[in-house]
Image (cartoon, rainbow, N blue to C red):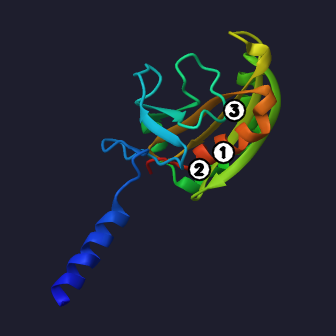
């Protein structure tokens, strides 16, 4: 009986350590993306501006993905050796400083009209999120972009999502949930 109990405990422990089927883990950098249902995280196409690319899709079709490839969001991580000499507290202070917020806003004004800017904190990391009405691109009038960015001593994580204007409230809830599912390498 003790053997059976020990085996049962071992199986339960192993199952609790397993990652959800929808999770993405990069062993090289330590990036983890574990979105909740109905979202799935899969390796995305390589990009020159990122070391890791993860595409997020929704099995329920909600919120509606306006991207032709069906992806709702993209998570990228770029290693940054220049951050290595800074503590997380120093990076957090810089990440949400007035100068940094102004710089991020200026960058996004190039692609569209800012509809919102906010700061956030998750797992001891601080970052900035913006909502942008793009001024170009397919169906740009009916799409809004959500972008969240934050940094660690290892690099920068970015979550970029696109949603339809008429679903924006629902979409923002989903986008922030996806952002919270990202564990950036420290």
- Depth check, front residue: 36 or 147: 36
Check the image and report above or below for 115 versus 112. Answer: below
For the residues labelled 1 and 3, the Cα–Cα distance comes to 9 Å
Report x, y in % for residue 168: 77, 34
For the residues labelled 3 and 2, the Cα–Cα distance comes to 14 Å
- Residue at 73% across / 34% down in the picture? 130
Q: What residue is pinned by disc 2? A: 180
Q: What residue is pinned by disc 1? A: 176
- Residue at 45% across / 27% down in the picture? 50
Report x, y in % for residue 113: 82, 21
Q: What residue is pinned by disc 3? A: 146
Horizontal side, residue 125 vs residue 51: left or right: right
Residue 109: assigned label: none
Which quadrant of the structure image shows residue 165? top right
Are there few (<14), some (14-19), or many (20+) residues within 10 Å of tag 3?
Answer: many
Are there few (<14), some (14-19), or many (20+) residues within 10 Å of tag 2?
Answer: some
Q: Are marks 1 and 2 in contact (CB under 8 Å)?
A: yes
Q: Secondary structure at mark 2?
A: helix
Which quadrant of the structure image shows residue 146? top right
Report x, y in % for residue 88: 54, 54
- Residue at 81% across / 29% down in the picture? 166
Q: Secondary structure at mark 1?
A: helix
- Depth check, front residue: 15 or 133: 15
Which quadrant of the structure image shows residue 144? top right
Pointer 3 or 2: first along the chain: 3
Q: Is residue 92 among what the camera can see?
A: yes
Horizontal side, residue 85 vs residue 110: left or right: left
- Residue at 57% across / 58% down in the picture? 123
Pointer 1 or 3: first along the chain: 3
Check the image and report above or below for 139 versus 62. Answer: above
Of the 4 image quadrants, the one containing the N terminus is bottom left
Q: Secondary structure at mark 3?
A: strand
């Amino acid at each position: 009986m003790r053997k059976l109990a020990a085996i049962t405990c071992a199986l339960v422990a192993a199952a609790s350590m397993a990652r959800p089927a929808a999770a993405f883990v990069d062993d090289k950098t330590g990036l983890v993306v574990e979105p909740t249902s109905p979202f799935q995280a899969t390796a995305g196409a390589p990009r020159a501006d990122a070391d890791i690319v993860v595409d997020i899709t929704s099995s329920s079709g909600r919120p509606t993905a306006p991207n032709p490839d069906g992806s709702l969001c993209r998570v990228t991580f770029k290693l940054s050796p220049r951050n290595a000499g800074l503590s997380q507290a120093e990076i957090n202070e810089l990440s949400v400083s007035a100068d940094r917020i102004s710089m991020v806003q200026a960058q996004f004004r190039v692609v569209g009209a800012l509809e919102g800017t906010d700061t956030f904190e998750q797992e001891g990391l601080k970052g900035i999120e913006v909502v942008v009405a793009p001024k170009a691109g397919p169906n740009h009038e009916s799409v809004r972009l959500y972008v969240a960015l934050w940094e660690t001593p290892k690099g920068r994580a970015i979550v970029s999502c696109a949603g339809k204007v008429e679903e924006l409230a629902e979409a923002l809830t989903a986008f922030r949930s996806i952002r919270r599912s990202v564990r950036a390498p420290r």
